[in-house]
Amino acid sequence: MLLLTLVSLMGVAQAASSSTSSSGVSSASSYVPWSLADNATNLALLQSQLTMCTYSKVEECIQDPETVAELGTLFRSPGYCAAFDSAYVNITTSLAAIPNRYYPTSIEDAYDAGFSNKFSEWSDANREQFEVDCPLLYNDTIALGDDMLCCTESQYTGLSTQVRMIPGLCSACKENLRNIFCQMTCSPNNSMFLDVNEVRIMPGDDEHEDQVFPAIEELTYYVGEDWIRDIYDFCEDDSSFSLLCNPNQDCNDGFGLMEYMGKYAFNSIGSPLQINVTTMAKQPESVQESEFCHCDDGNQTECISPMNNRLTSCVGVCGSLCAVSADDTRTYTEACYGAETSSSGSGSVVDNDDDATWAELNEYLASNITATDWTPLNYFLVIFGGVVGLMLIVGFIVAMCRERRNGTVDHNLSTPNTGLYTPEVNGVAHAMAASVGRLSFMDELMTNKLRTWALFVSKGNRPKKIIPMVLVVVAICAAGLHNIDIETDPIKLWVS
């Protein structure tokens, strides 16, 4: 179920959200302020340029839509969108997601055109839920005073339904996985890190019969090197993560994870568009210099700026479900051309925009932590345990030798048993001798062993041997306690 849920998140809404059976969402999504059908001349020109789609294998696609004027003019800058709203096309699979729509526009122009992308005008329930579903995006935008997004309220409703079904025990991992789709769908700056490679010209569904949408068939999602590293590291030990990224299937890093989750699966359980995740470092040097934003250029427009927001660390949050050690130190570099300086961050620290507020307090608290070296104590415990164990073994051997010597002397001095044999005196021997039948080989074996043990225990002065023997057994059984891992994660304890 995890697999089916997560990979379907690439779409922004379920097909069911546009059906007449849906309440609330259908009425909102049925009204679309603009579609390609609004300009018959442009639509005719587009239809004359259609080629074979790379993934859906129908002759309905346009390659490099950014170069096609009839689809709009893409402007790369903060506050501009490359993907905006949903393409409300017909879906026959009930749980399949519908693709994003290619609609290059600014967030202000989209709002002026009648789209519901102003956060403050959303319902109270959706505003509260957005903060829960997309906390990283919320902190980077709404919390800082921004009010416009690249997604509409009805589009977010479908996204929210999907992300809330993400299972797993590590809350940091779930938050980071949700962030992938929140940024792609709703970030007011998605034109900076999304590159739409191919669109499919498709008619609307039953609620949008007279409309035509440029549904995204394929896009490239640019991310930073730190981002692609952390998205894998902070989820690696989550018990459900292997369903998405299995090392046995050559998935050993963030690229493998995103390749699997972004695989094209339109009208099926999976991603309704092909998503190719890459980084600036994977591009030729000439492309990096000409296409990506330069670190020393304050005018970050008409260039690609990979999405590289700091993800939530699992350290101190997910307990044993976190693969990153508490003393891990990570180096973070800006995702721009010419980046030379980097900052160090501990795996135990979640670096968000509000870190500077608490930096002084954190430094003060850290300076008051007394460092304790437990190495001498560990050596002492090991030596002490070894000495005690050796003494037990030596004592056991000595006791056995003395008992054997004393037993030989007693046997030579003993006299035959005369007179009446009484079970009260030799009760154990009598009870054992009374058993004359053989039920099975195992029964006889166990009877003989128990008889030997009973005679050994009941014979005089045996506590001198029995106690050391028992202590040796206990010591052996408890030898592995130094490797005990005490679970303190409340989430995992609750699930258990």
Image (tube, grey):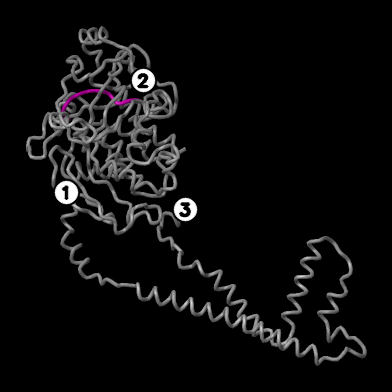
Residue 342 numbered tag: 1
Residue under the image location 27 percent in, 41 percent down? 127
Marks 3 and 1 sit apart, C-alpha to C-alpha, by 39 Å
User: Which kind of residue does numbered mark 3 sit on?
Assistant: Val
Q: Which of the two labelled residues, at mark 2 and mark 3, occupies the earlier sequence position? A: 2
Q: What residue sits 79% from the left and 70% below the top?
A: 448
Q: In the displayed structure, does residue 37 sit left or right of residue 434?
A: left
Extreme-right residue of the structure? 419
Above-or-below relation of 350 to 1: below
Residue 105 part of the magenta-drawn span: yes
Label disc, if present, on residue 495 of the rendered structure? 3
Q: Please say if 63 is above or below 437.
A: above
Q: Amino acid at mark 1?
A: Ser
Query: Which percent across, then down, holds residue 351?
Result: 22, 51
Q: What residue sits 57% from the left and 78% below the top?
A: 393
Whether the residues at callouts 3 and 1 have beta carbons within 8 Å, the answer is no
Name the quadrant containing residue 8.
top left
Mark sitting earlier along the chain (3/1) = 1
Q: Is residue 159 magenta?
A: no
Where, by quadrant of the figure, is residue 203 drawn? top left
* In this rendering, the label closer to the viewer, 1 or 2: 1
State whether the magenta stretch is mostly helix, strand or loop.
strand
Packing grade of label 3 (10 A; few <14, some 14-19, many >=20) is few
Q: Nearer the viewer, mark 2 or mark 3?
A: 2
The magenta stretch is: 98-107
Q: CA distance from mark 2 to mark 3?
A: 41 Å
Q: Which residue is mark 2?
A: 55
**Frontmost residue, 291 versus 389:** 389
Q: Is residue 326 left or right of residue 95?
A: left
Side of 183 relative to 297 (left or right): right
- Is 486 placed left or right of 397 in the picture? left
